[in-house]
Image: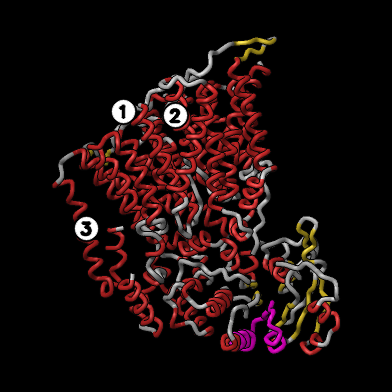
Amino acid sequence: MFPQQLVNGLTVGGIYAIVALGYSMVYGVLQIVNWAHADVLMVGTFIGLILVTQLHMPVLAMVILAAAATALIGITVERAAYRPIKSDNRRMAVLVSALGMSVFLQNLAQLVFGSSTKPLPTIKKIPYTIGSVSFTNIQIIIGVTTILMLIILYIVVYKTKMGIAMRACSVSIPNAKLMGINTNSIISMTFGIGAFMAGIAGICIGTYYNAVYPTMGYMLGMKAFSAAILGGIGSIPGAVVGGFLIGIIESLGAGYISSGYRDAYAFIIMIIILIIRPSGILGAKHIDKV
Amino acid sequence: MTIRFGGLTAVDSVSLEQNRGEILSLIGPNGAGKTTFFNLLTGVYQPNEGSIVFSGRNITKMKAYERTNFGIARTFQNIRLFKSMTVLENILVAHKDCNQETLLSAVLFPGRIVKRRKAVIEKCLELLDVVGLADMKEELATSLPYGKQRLLEIARGLATDPQLLLLDEPGAGMNNLEKEELTRVVHHITKKMERDVLIIEHDMKFVMNISDRIIVLDHGMKIAEGLPHEIQNDKKVIQAYLGSGTFKDDDE
Amino acid sequence: MVGDREAKMKSIKLTTGTKTILLGIFTAALFIVPFIIKDTYILHVIISCFIYSCLALSLNLIIGLTGQFSLGHVTFYGMGAYITALLMMKASMSFWLTILISAAGVGIFGYLLALPALNLRGDYLAVVTLGFGEVFRLFLVNAIDITRGPMGIPGIPSPKIGSFVINTKQEYYFLALIILIAVVIFVRRLIISGFGLSMLCVKEDDVAASAIGIYPRKYKLWAFVIGAVIAGIMGSFYAVYMSFISPSSFQYGESITMVSMVILGGMGSIAGPILGACILTVLPEALRSFSEYRMIIYGAALVIMMIFKPNGIWGLDKRVRNIYMLQAGRGVKNGKSASGIQCDNSLRRADSGR
């Protein structure tokens, strides 16, 4: 049973990691939590659903197109709901604005697509069994996609000029501006990349559970956010570690303890780790300068 | 006392003693560890080695707020007043009788503490008089000009009824007129109120003028100690300020 | 806010006379409302406003006064509701006794939750409190032996005073109004006290607060405990008022609504959270005729509000200056000291200015 739970845990863990990266990157650059991230993901998944069921697009084209559309939505959300807010208490104002955005997107999706759960027929499921472990081709594809995205992200962030600019912004936006970096476009790019990956993650999870619905973002978002916090928000490797950790713990907890509390394990582990180590596993320790 | 941040030893085995009613100044180039030293004294940081004895008691393990209640108050280099509060309120909250009001008396028996509140308000108005801000008591603290904000912070420190008051660059951003006012206030504190004052300051004219004694820090170490005119002629001090030829990267 | 002003401001009638009279009339009007409006739906909306006002005021102590970003207020609310429901159903206790027990129980829970959580900053605290809320809700759903799980607990008995049973909407209206007035008086006395000022210091700058002898942890803990106790009491009221509770009433969305109320209305004040609570309770109801569009409008309204009025409608920027003098003003009147006159002046200016 253990290897089986591990495989399932790794599958969803990878998806959590990808979504967590979206939270973590935005936090790294702007020090705000993009609470609408998961709803952007949900809208992206619905776009994918439309593309595949109404327009009968090939899967690969659908994924790329849907992710691009999600990226656009992510950028729009930042421009519409975060950037215009100027306040000495910006963090709280952005929180409320983001929550408003989340309500807006969820209900818009409900209005347009209906509130019922819809299947996402992308790939035909083919089961395999090796020893006592059974898995499907979907799980393999999700795993490969996850690894591919992590590699691409690594190259973008650590090997390109834009990545350097992004990391500069995460140290200090005013200083980055003084160095001639167009910080506004970097912020947009950060949201865009996060949303692009979220779009792909949404289609992956929609295919895995074969379900798409307007509130699908909430739990996924909460767990991914827990993963980002767990790993140390703002840290890219932290988000990946946190995502896989949460996926595996939840899968093992559901298998060995009780499946009713499946959604609770992520939170319990996160709470315990934060209490022991408030800055997360790989987060930087914060020193107050007086 | 010694404190290290990672590999950096910010304050290295510095020791000092202060006498009653004395104005002692702590000077040194940027990054010498002056503010860090203050933070050690007030309990923002804990020293890795050494101890602090105040009024005959070892207070090394005390938390910041306990030290304040024990008689050490401070101001901050980058002014930290309470933004949404008025000038008077900024001082009120520093007074023991105000900030140690219990929830029970505040909510169930507000009538009984009216007298005490009145006394607190009067005491604080007196302190505002000392720094010359009494007629601005209803302004928001942040609407005051910079120099007056510094004076207000001093008054706030005084409201905690300290024996020792630590001033972190009280003259920064002040014009000459305001510095004269500051000198008057500091003298009032030491002469009339009989409190001790420890000052960090960069304005040498001001320091030489006001201090009874001066201590010089550089790279976290004490390099000189003495009367103002002794310090003025100390070779090591001049070298620390003007540099010894080699470039040193000092930033704070 | 109303009844409190009426009671508290007597001492400074001369300076705030008109205000006092207006607030007095408003309070009296609130007591007459159920005799004029018989429509149970409207009464229900008003009672909801009262409940959320209390919840927002209690959350305001945590967010607005000590600056702790708690997204788990619904946990306290739900816990209070379940304690009352279970004790009344299983132990046939009197409602009034269960209120005390749930206030104490939820208060202790708030303390235990805050103890470790206080080491966390900003968004970390937010996500931990949110996580606690989710774990609590999942417990309600899964612990079927105790809570009946998602089916909820129906048939919670009505509260009794002697042989009089509080049963109709009108009667609940009065109960809710009295609770609201009590909460307002409590919160107001707290805000104008040295205790309240110290809380505000902790919110604004805890390093500076420590430097003047305030122990930030103490106030943060108290804020959590008081906030939890009030929310627990409101939960108890909600349980008997609805006579049915289920985990779906205590989802994370409720916490978020409460936070929105506090921030939209304005943090740190009394009028702010009440305004926020009323607006965010009435708005979705008023938009009912747009049915499917209403939550979309609601979401967009939150975004637009934050862009144009990020500090809320009635926030700290509208704070009465030198509020601590309000009560000392009474002593000053009798005392006639030199600074006493100054106190009065400051009050007059504070009131006319703001």
Q: Amino acid at mark 3?
A: Phe
Q: Quadrant of the N terminus of chain A?
A: top right
Q: Which residue is mark 1?
A: C155
x 72%, y 80%: residue: B25
Q: Quadrant of the C terminus of chain A?
A: bottom right
**Is residue B2 positioned above or below C337 on the image?**
above
Q: Which residue is mark 3?
A: C26
Q: Chain of mark 1?
A: C
Q: Which residue is mark 2?
A: A47
Classify mark 1: helix, strand or loop: loop
Of circles 1 and 2, the one toward us is: 2
- Image coordinates of residue C46 in percent, x first then y, are 25, 45
Nearer-the-camera pick, C263 or C233: C263
Residue A121 belongs to magenta span: no
Nearer-the-camera pick, C123 or C32: C123
Kindly indicate whether the residues beneath marks 2 and 3 are on one polypeptide chain. Answer: no
Task: Provide the residue span drawn in magenta.
Answer: B182-209
Classify mark 3: helix, strand or loop: helix
